[in-house]
Image (cartoon, rainbow, N blue to C red):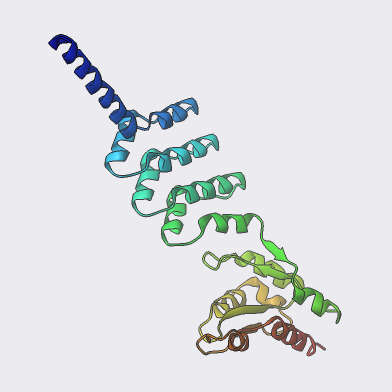
Amino acid sequence: MGSGAIASLLLFFLILIGVVVIFSFIPVGLWISALAAGVRVGIVTLIGMRLRRVPPARIVNPLIKADKAGLNITVNQLEAHYLAGGNVDRVVNALIAAERAAIPLPFERAAAIDLAGREVFQAVQMSVNPKVLETPLVSAVAKDGIECEVVDVRSLSPLDVDTIVSSVKKTGRLAIVEDDNENFGWGAEVAAKITNSEAFDFLDEPILRVAGNNIPIPYSPELEKAAVPQVEDVISAVKGVFSRRG
């Protein structure tokens, strides 16, 4: 084999290695997917993500989803949120849910909620469809002619106060059940918000709080049951409130 043939073969292998390196560094498949979806993301932008150690798929896939939903979100916004430690998918899902429910939710607000460690998508879901649960408590007190509903607000921050207000207006009473300590527990904050709301005038009885004892949670399962409220404790407390009605 002549020197010319060796040089050509060497050049071929160098080109082949270069192509493999380029295709491994640049997510061409992702670029094609974005292009097919009508989302313009430049090759240079994808290379920049690689250099900044941002997985392009973490940005491009949510961007495609947002574009299909009619949201006006930029690559820079999503990448900045990712670099700040945020969950891009969670924010985009929340924005899509808010858009479909006609709930105003700017990207900056959703990103701030996510960075604060709150479940922004769950908060939007709660605003759209508050969950009213059937529990053993409901059937237990129903036998005594007491009708009640259990509202699982699912999120304390932000708190869906409107759901609780609506329930208080309907029932005229409010029992807050929490497995936290009674002293400085979150139930006190809920009670304060209802006291300062329009629902206060609908209350026929003082707000009832059923909370854990003001002690550290014991290691033993049996002792733990004694430290936090059980179903029987809640039933007894609710029946006690209704036994005072005149």
Image point (15%, 9%), residue name: 2
Left/right placement of residue 104 relative to residue 27 reads right
**Compared with residue 213, is residue 138 higher up or lower down, i.e. above or below?**
above
Residue 159 position by quadrant: bottom right
User: Which one is nearer the viewer's eye here, 157 or 14?
Assistant: 14
Left/right placement of residue 149 relative to residue 187 reads right
Q: Percent position (x, y) of residue 238?
A: 74, 83
Q: Percent position (x, y) of residue 127?
A: 61, 57
**Compared with residue 140, is residue 132 higher up or lower down, i.e. above or below?**
above
User: Which one is nearer the viewer's eye here, 225 or 46?
Assistant: 225
**Compared with residue 115, is residue 228 higher up or lower down, i.e. above or below?**
below
Q: Residue furthest front?
A: 1
Determine if residue 22 is in view.
yes
Q: Residue furthest left?
A: 3
Q: Quadrant of the N terminus?
A: top left
Q: Quadrant of the C terminus?
A: bottom right
Determine if residue 147 is in view.
no
Image point (41%, 29%), residue name: 31
Q: Percent position (x, y) of residue 220?
A: 56, 86
Residue 204 position by quadrant: bottom right
Left/right placement of residue 172 relative to residue 37 reads right
User: Which one is nearer the viewer's eye here, 203 or 34?
Assistant: 34
Image point (13%, 11%), residue name: 3
